[in-house]
Amino acid sequence: MKFKLSCKEVSELVSRSLDEPLPWRQRLGVRLHHAYCRMCRRYAVQIRFLSHATRAWLHRQEKAGAGLSPEARARIREMLNSDHRPAPQPSGKVTPPASTK
C-alpha cells in the first residue's frame, strides 16, 4: 500500500470510514495526507458532521414516532446494499409529434 494518497483516494476512504473501520495502513495514509492537505481535512470534518447530524436527526424522528414504516426501511436498506439502481422516472414532459412536412 502506498502512503502518499491522492485527494480522491482520501475522500473515498474518509467516506467509507463512516460505515466501516479502515485497516491501520489506510488510516495511517489518511492521517499523513491530512497532515499536509487542508482541503481534505476540511472535507473530513464536514462529512463527519453531516453524518452525525443526519444520524441524530433520524434518531429524534424515530423517538417521535415519525418516519418510515419498517417495510419501507427494509426496501431502502435492500436498495442501498445492492447494485440495483431504479429506472429513471419520466419527466412528465410531452414530446411534440414529428412534423409531417
Image (spheres, rainbow, N blue to C red):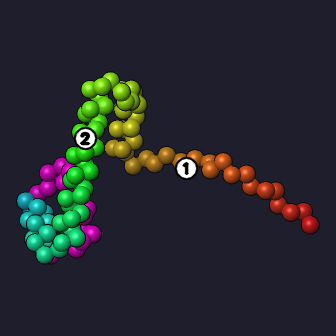
Q: Is residue 58 above or below residue 6?
A: above
Q: Earlier in the sequence, mark 1 or mark 2?
A: 2
Picture residue at 22% right of the left edge, 52% below the top? 49
Q: How many labels sit on residues?
A: 2
Picture residue at 32% right of the left edge, 24% below the top? 65
Residue type indicated by callout 2: Arg
Quadrant location of the N terminus in the rendered image: bottom left
Mark 2 burial class by Cα count in 10 Å: few <14, some 14-19, many 20+: few
Numbered label attached to residue 76: none
Residue type indicated by callout 1: Pro
Q: Is residue 44 above or below residue 7?
A: above
Label 2 element class: helix
Please tell me in which quadrant of the rendered image residue 17 appears. bottom left
**Range covered by the magenta-colored residues:** 4-23
Mark 1 burial class by Cα count in 10 Å: few <14, some 14-19, many 20+: few
Q: Going by the image, does 45 lie left or right of 92?
A: left
Query: Which x, y percent locates residue 80?
Result: 36, 44
Q: Is residue 18 above or below residue 60?
A: below
Quadrant location of the C terminus in the rendered image: bottom right
Label 1 element class: loop
Is residue 9 on the magenta stretch? yes
Numbered label attached to residue 55: 2
- Answer yes or no: is residue 13 visible: no
Query: Which x, y percent locates residue 37?
Result: 17, 74
Comparing 54 with 90, the one in front is: 54
Comparing 44 with 76, the one in front is: 44
Front label number (1 vs 2): 2
- Report the residue marked by disc 1: 88
Please tell me in which quadrant of the rendered image residue 47 appears. bottom left
Query: Which x, y percent locates residue 95?
Result: 74, 55
Comparing 22 with 65, the one in front is: 65
